[in-house]
Image (spheres, rainbow, N blue to C red):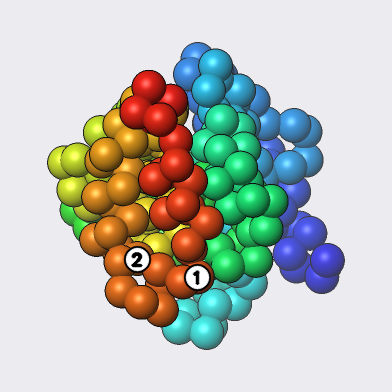
Amino acid sequence: MSSMKAEINECLCANLEKGMDAWLLQSGFVRRKNTLVYARELADALQRIEITMEIHPADRPDSAAAIYPWLEISMDAVEKLIIEMMGGDLSPLPGPAGGTLREPIEFTSAKAAPARWLIFQPDSLPGVVGEMKSFMQRWTLPFLDTYSNPKGICDAYDRGDARIINDLAQKIRVAAAMVLCGRGADAMDVMEQWFGKSGPRKRFQRIFDYLTMCRPGEL
């Protein structure tokens, strides 16, 4: 870690301790000392908020750093079912395996507000942390409260929730969540809509076979 990054990291941690830790702890999020990651463990999900930092961003080289937080959600039941449906071979899955959802927290505002903050001087950090807290309070925590179990995944898909990254890896997780919620026919509809053409169908034939072979009572 460069000396500048280490200095900003230390200053940011100090300001998170003063302006963010106690507030997020009320919602169950804990940050370990000297880290930029908040995490909470729920009944059906592990949720993380990572305060990522870029030194001298290319679009604003006059700034010391840019803060651009990400969220990550992992639901064991969803990920284990995907492994089962894929017969243990996750290589056809698009994107990294193991996480149910990973995206910038900016997505949780559905384009209503940005979530990237520039740091110019150390004395600007309290204001940055305050703005980040306001953003999370309005947009991110309400999203995380609803996207916390397989039913939340299904509900978000049903309403076309614009707060979720729209990629094919997410559609596989929607199908798995629907199976877990007893919606096997809907899971097959998702697969047909997004992977029904010959190329994608061949790639994910094991999932189609799984959904076809399971008895209705098992879906």
Q: Please rate how many residues cluster around mark 1, counting C-alpha atoms within 10 Å: few if below 14, some from 14 to 19, many from 20.
A: few
Look at the image and tell me in which quarter the C terminus lies. top left
Residue occupying the point 31% across, 74% down: 197
Regarding residue 147, the answer to whether it shows in the image is no
Residue occupying the point 39% across, 45% down: 212
- In percent of width and height, residue 167 lies at 38, 63
- In percent of width and height, residue 91 lies at 65, 66
Q: In front here: 100 or 50? A: 100
Q: In this view, does 77 lie above or below 3?
A: above
Secondary structure category for the residue under label 1: helix
| Residue 137 shown left or right of residue 48 in the figure | left
Secondary structure category for the residue under label 2: helix
Q: In front here: 120 or 129? A: 129
- The numbered mark at residue 203 is 1
Residue type, numbered disc 1: Arg
Residue type, numbered disc 2: Phe
Residue occupying the point 36% across, 77% down: 198
Residues under numbered marks 1 and 2 in contact, where contact means CB atoms less than 8 Å apart: yes
- In percent of width and height, residue 140 lies at 37, 38
Report the Cα–Cα distance between label 1 and label 2: 9 Å
Residue occupying the point 42% across, 54% down: 208
- In percent of width and height, residue 103 lies at 46, 55
- The numbered mark at residue 127 is none
Look at the image and tell me in which quarter the N terminus lies. bottom right
Give the residue pinned by disc 2: 195
| Residue 86 shown left or right of residue 211 in the figure | right
Q: What is the tally of numbered marks visible in this picture?
A: 2
Q: In front here: 208 or 49? A: 208
| Residue 5 shown left or right of residue 167 in the figure | right
